[in-house]
Image (cartoon, rainbow, N blue to C red):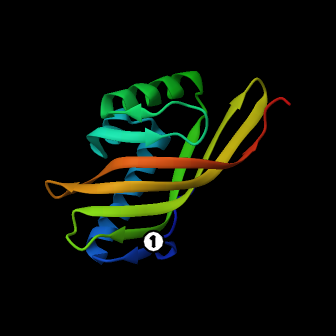
Amino acid sequence: MPRPAKSDVQLVGDKSAARAIAAARADFNAALESRALKAIATHLVEDVVLVPGDEAQLITGREAQLEAWSSIFSQMPDVSYVRTPGRIEVCEDSHLAAETGRWKGGWSSEGFAIRYMGRYFAKWRCVDGVWQIEAETFVTMKRSGGAS
């Protein structure tokens, strides 16, 4: 799935920091696409929290999230997830930032193409000069595919 053009993202606050977060998001999307668990890990704080968009359980911690991604990648070889930021806002002290946007996910199962999409919110924290994801919350707005 294509990455958004930089001009598509509204940057608020420290523009340099917001651009660094946009670049980190693009890198995170690329890591998901290539199934690069080590690269995914570099973008997550140790106690990161992920709130899935559906009935799936809360995932707390970098290791738990990496285990979840590993399981997803092995069970659904064609899975793809992309987060597309619409707005990145850096707080006044430049240590926290909020990212909002749209996400898409897709895979095939038993001959059906499954597609999910929705909205997300990410909380970023600058740790030793590097922006990392501290929390992500997803809301599934639309589903398609699969058996009825």
- Give the residue drawn at x 47%, y 72%: 9
Q: Which residue is mark 1?
A: 6
Q: Position of residue 121 (x, y in %)?
A: 47, 56
- Helix, strand or loop for disc 1: helix
Q: Is residue 1 visible?
A: no
Check the picture and name the quadrant holding the C terminus.
Answer: top right
Position of residue 148 in the picture relative to residue 92 (left or right): right
Q: Quadrant of residue 70?
A: top left
Tell me where residue 44 sits by quadrant: top left
In front: 120, or 7?
120
Residue 93 shows in the view? yes
**Foreground residue among 7 and 132:** 132
**Position of residue 39 measured from the top left corner of the image (x, y, whole percent):** 33, 41
Left or right for 57, reference 43: right
Q: Quadrant of residue 54?
A: top right
Q: Amino acid at mark 1?
A: Lys
Q: Is residue 62 left or right of residue 102?
A: left
Identify whether 86 is placed above or below 13: above
